[in-house]
Image: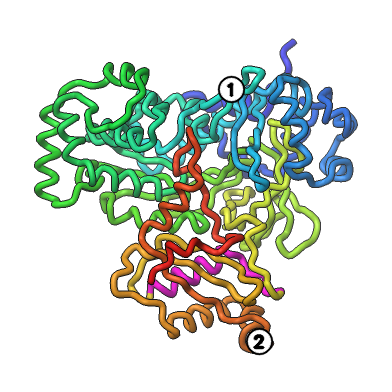
Amino acid sequence: MNEKPTIPEYLLRLSDGCFGIEAFSLFEESERVQRELLGQILRSASHTEFGKRYDFASIHDVNQFRERIPILSWKDFEPYSDRLVRGEKDLLFPGKAQFFTLTSGTSGKEKYIPDSSMSAVVRKLILRYRMAQYLKEVPDLLTGKFLPLTNAPQISYTSAGIPCGTASGLTLGQATLDRFLAYPMCILQNKDPESRDYLLMRFAIEQERIFSIAGNNAGRLTGLIALAKRYWQDIIRDIELGRMDGARSVDAEVEEELRKYSRPNPERAERLRELAREADDFVPKTYWPDLRLALFWLSSSVGSYVEEVKPLLPSATKYMDVGYGSSEAKFNIPMRAGERSGALSIATAFYEFLPEEGGEPVLAHEVEEGKCYELIVTTWAGLYRYNMKDIVRVDGFVGKTPKIEFIRKSSELLNIAGEKIPASAVNDCVRDLLRDYQRQVRQVQVFCDMEEHRYVCYVELMDPEGFKVTEEVDERANRLLADRFQFYGMRIYQHQILKPMRLVLMRQGWQDSLYASKLKPGLSLSQIKLPILILEPAAEKWIAR
């Protein structure tokens, strides 16, 4: 007798061929779905080492689950992960780990986040749900090509032979979109990063009908566009001749594979030359005029990079959030263009919400609109009551399911003297202020100078020509922050236990240097999240004089 399928397995079968649209009715039943899902996760892991430790078999409701298991962090799961890396099984979930997602930990040590056999099911399901929403915005999306800004699906193996890679690469590898891709996937395996980016743009620009672009950080696309502008003549010549001469260092196996896709295309090359002459600027709105949809993170400070990209893309392009998620799991389903939030993915993980102001965690159907919470997740991949250290805001509901938006990491809090300001709020204030001076901000980072009892805010502008940080600019920045956070104003203007924040203008290229310092083999810039709050002052050599 076959076992009853889990909720994700059932919904994935139901959604075959229709991208899950029928299953959206479950948004009206968030409480039932969440409770049933938790029971399925616990039953599936009841015979594991972790499940036996907490006696999952005797847990019959949410209250028992909460009483039995405390809120946990990565340090609680890391010993299990280390053993799974060595090939042990039945520790956190049934069987061995199928894959490890690599991400950096707060201590600097890489985290190996395991995937179970169910991980592929839930990942495919949420991708299908997201695709349903993209197709609502752009119904003919799949008639054009898709440009993913991602990493290679797999970059290494553990000592036990289990593959490891990045979250975005794994997602693309399981999305079965190969026939829609704007470039051959083998390009992502090339070791030299600049040559890899050149090849990506060389093959993508050869495609005229690119309808969608997707990546995490829009800054990654900005960098690729800049590279294409530098080498546009080489790119067009390579397209014309069916070659790859503009790439300085191509791995032999990558070059051999790319020869299958390289054919002389003089017609496209000539058209690109005409477009470059007519537009006088070699950017995507010139060579991809039919681009319909751009998918990036729109929320938090990372969303500001989208503003830098918009002037370079066609004016008719729609922007949707690519979806909130992490190396641990994916958490929401973007519903409409321009919205930074998305409906909670209630069928793929169990969620609890710890109120930012304090108190006991609440369930998905108990959250309140407009309030912020710290997200706690229980997943099919063996994370139980795992504190993501993410602050999310509830932005309304779809049926009875909350829409959530990522705001910031809970650790990014400025608190020299009890003022408790999210670092993201300083970022927002500085950007709002400098917009009054007709300046767009590329990067913001804040250092807490404990000796001086003040914040130092480092800023790189997109166009710094003729702009200086004056006393007036500093004063306006502090007044704006004080207006939004009364305790900050009290600490400066009444109690005088904080000195006013100081803005420091940075030289062009500072942001690029920050990305370069964090880049590791096999990773792309889109995977790097630059913090707003930094623990050391910025390098003196980058300060504008």
Assign the N terminus to one quadrant of the image: top right
x 13%, y 33%: residue? 269
x 59%, y 57%: residue? 408
Which one is in front, 345 or 229? 229
Picture quadrant where residue 215 is located: top left
Picture quadrant where residue 241 is located: top left
Report the amino acid beneath label 2.
Answer: Gln
Report the amino acid beneath label 1.
Answer: Tyr
Query: In the image, is residue 146 above or below residue 462?
Result: above
Residue 243 locus on image (x, y percent): 21, 25
Q: SS at mark 1?
A: strand
Q: Is residue 17 left or right of residue 466?
A: right
x 39%, y 26%: residue? 185
**Label located before the other in sequence (2 or 1):** 1
Q: Is residue 162 left or right of residue 52?
A: left
For the residues marked 2 and 1, what is the alpha-carbon distance in whole angstroms?
56 Å
Please name the residue that numbered disc 2 is placed on: 496
Please name the residue that numbered disc 1 is placed on: 157
Q: Which residues are magenta?
A: 418-435
